[in-house]
Image (spheres, rainbow, N blue to C red):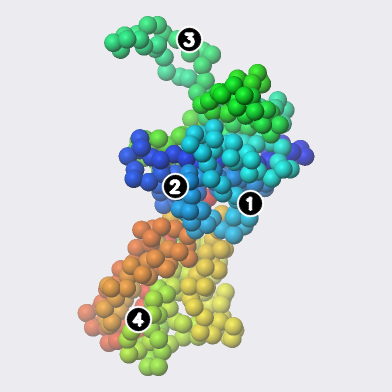
Amino acid sequence: MSAINHHPARVGVVIPAGGIGTRIGSHQPKQFLPLAGIPILVRSCRIFLAREDIHVVVVAAPAEYFQQSVDLLHTHLNEKEQTRLLITVGGATRQDSVRAGLETLPADIDVVLVHDAARPLADQATIDRCLQGAVKYGAVIAAVPVKDTLKLVGDRATIDRTLDRSALWQAQTPQAVRRDLLAQAFAEAARKKFIGTDEASLLEAAGIPVRVVAGSEQNLKITHPEELKMAAAILAEDANVKIGHGFDAHRLVPGRQLILGGVAIDFELGLDGHSDADVVAHALTDALLGALGAGDIGRHFPDSDSSYKGINSLLLLERIYHLVEEQHYRLANADLTIVCQRPRLAPFLDMMQSNLARCCKVDPPAINIKATTTEKMGYTGRGEGIATHAVVLLRSEHGRR
């Protein structure tokens, strides 16, 4: 439990998200790139949205990617997370974006944390130290001591001298400060026309003391492809995962619309069932429940309940995915196999993938769907029914400790 929970301070977070991915070699802003299946920006926001002592998170998005940022965050964050999220237009510089975020924070916020959008691995202990430090001292930053020997290099790549690293620290984020002090620093910077590299430099220029608290070596700022690979490796090492399997089969009958993966398919037969009998959505739903240890689809949506008669099974999938989120897990990936002799399903797989990905708030490549026949063997081979197997991997997203 953070000490900030015992203090009347109301805490807000500003995440400047103006990077465009030049050094990482991406055609889109680096904060949109997936890290273990989830966009970097989403991970950075969730670090803070997972905490009850954070009242609001403001993302300052680049103007040219504003709507894309809104869509991305609304797609991947659940309703509860979105209630504490604000998105504003950032500026040409980091300083402009942080100022825009600061102006967007509600008036009752009195402690501000500024965090890089490209630091998705900040741990909760570091955030605790930053919050406690801001309350006690007014302004602190997370940082780590410099370990390597540093050389001051002059013309012709010649070493001028070796620097004493004993007093050198590498700045990270969060950088935490009382709101009135940060506002004072911005006002002074505007008066002097000063452009700082981070919030600490603005505070320093305004004569406001800033203390250092311990950061973390794993609190990487993703700037190059190598850091993206390192972050993925750290997540894989720290991952708390659950695996689930789901299976569903329904009989093909006349007089029913064939629905698979939320896609209406033109065929002379449809699947019989209390709902729309979408075996693809049902199998994925059961796999999620299996991973959670929460029974099966029949327990949650019994066919004795008339409210589920004819219901769109994607709605049922969305409800179960809310349970996944409530337990602080996210879908890492899913693999589904549809067993069907007829009709031919290849033209519909991409649409199914998009539908299921939307329900599970992941990018479509995280859900793999295959269709196969049984060479006319068994009930599927005789065209009597369609079956689906699904396997899922859930990854814990309850913040890094």
Residue 229 appears in which quarter of the rendering? top left
Q: CA distance from mark 4 to mark 3?
A: 70 Å
Quadrant holding the C terminus: top right
Relative to 325, residue 166 above or below: above
Q: Is residue 36 visible?
A: no
Mark 1 residue type: Arg
Residue 349 appears in which quarter of the rendering? bottom left
Picture residue at 52% right of the left edge, 73% below the top: 316
Q: Which dot marks residue 265?
A: 4
Please tell me which residue lies in front, 36 or 392: 36
Circle 2 Cα neighbour tier, 10 Å, few/some/many (<14 / 14–19 / ≥20):
few
Residue bearing the label numbered 3: 164
Picture residue at 52% right of the left edge, 20% below the top: 169
Marked residue nearer the N-terminal end (3 or 1): 1
Mark 3 residue type: Asp
Relative to 254, residue 201 above or below: above
Say which of marks 2 and 1 sits in front: 2
Question: x and y percent of residue 95 in the render?
Answer: 54, 32
Helix or strand or loop: what does disc 1 sit on? Answer: loop
The single residue placed furthest to the left in the displayed view is 375
Question: x and y percent of residue 133 in the render?
Answer: 67, 29
Please tell me which residue lies in front, 228 or 351: 351
